[in-house]
Image: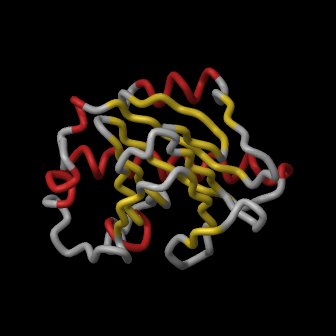
Amino acid sequence: MSFEEILAHFPDLKKDVCYKTLNDSLYFFEEIKDSIVVFKSEEEYWNLCLENESLKEILFLENEYSVMKNENSKKCDWVIYENKKIFFVESKDVKPRNRSKERKDAIEQLITTIEFYNSKINLNSLSIFSQICFQSKSRVIKAGDQARKVLFKQYNSEFSEGNFIKF
């Protein structure tokens, strides 16, 4: 599925506001409450690191404040697409002691977003990944617990927690 085929399902999206094409080797995203993503440098504060070693073209969708803006359901922050891989990403900017509560909310946001996209686009031919990002000072990726992995398998999605995605 091409970028154009995905974007055709959301015709009102504005380039560079609602979506961006990324092709640099490294990006650092900062989630700002009630706002679209801000790109940062590694020395600054950031929520997600996206590493693109092979300089592939990646479609970044500002999901919460653009694609699903008018939906009354929960929704994740970002959707990232590259060559049959789609990542649904929810970023949570909380301290470790508050993660349990926020994790439950993030899971609901991810699931409702997958269901929304599945109603618009046939995701069956894609590899689906769901990821919760928690604040960290280093690049972290972990599998998440078994119960969440099983839950997301119902949506044909791999599940992980961390603040790093590598292409």
Q: Is residue 21 left or right of residue 137?
A: left
Instruction: Describe residue 57's horizontal placement relative to residue 147 as left or right.
Output: left
Locate the N terminus by quadrant.
Answer: top left
Indicate the position of residue 141 as horizontal and vertical percent values: 67, 35
Q: Is residue 118 above or below residue 153?
A: below
Total number of numbered discs in the rendering: 0
Identify the residue at horizontal 75%, vertical 55% (top origin).
135
Q: Is residue 132 above or below residue 141?
A: below
Instruction: Return the residue found at the far right.
Output: 97
Q: Which is nearer the eye, 116 or 51?
A: 51
Quarter of image, res 149: top right
**Colouring convention used in this rendered image of the protein:** secondary structure
Residue 47 locus on image (x, y percent): 67, 58
41 above or below 153?
Answer: below
* Of residues 128 and 2, the one drawn nearer to the viewer in this rendering: 2
| Residue drawn at point x = 35 percent, y = 61 percent | 21
Residue 129 sits above or below residue 102 on the image: above
Residue 52 position in % (x across, y down): 50, 44
Residue 124 in percent (x, y) is at 23, 30
Q: Residue at x 63, y 43 (%)?
A: 164
Name the residue rendered at 83%, 56% in the picture. Answer: 95
Q: Is residue 99 left or right of residue 52?
A: right
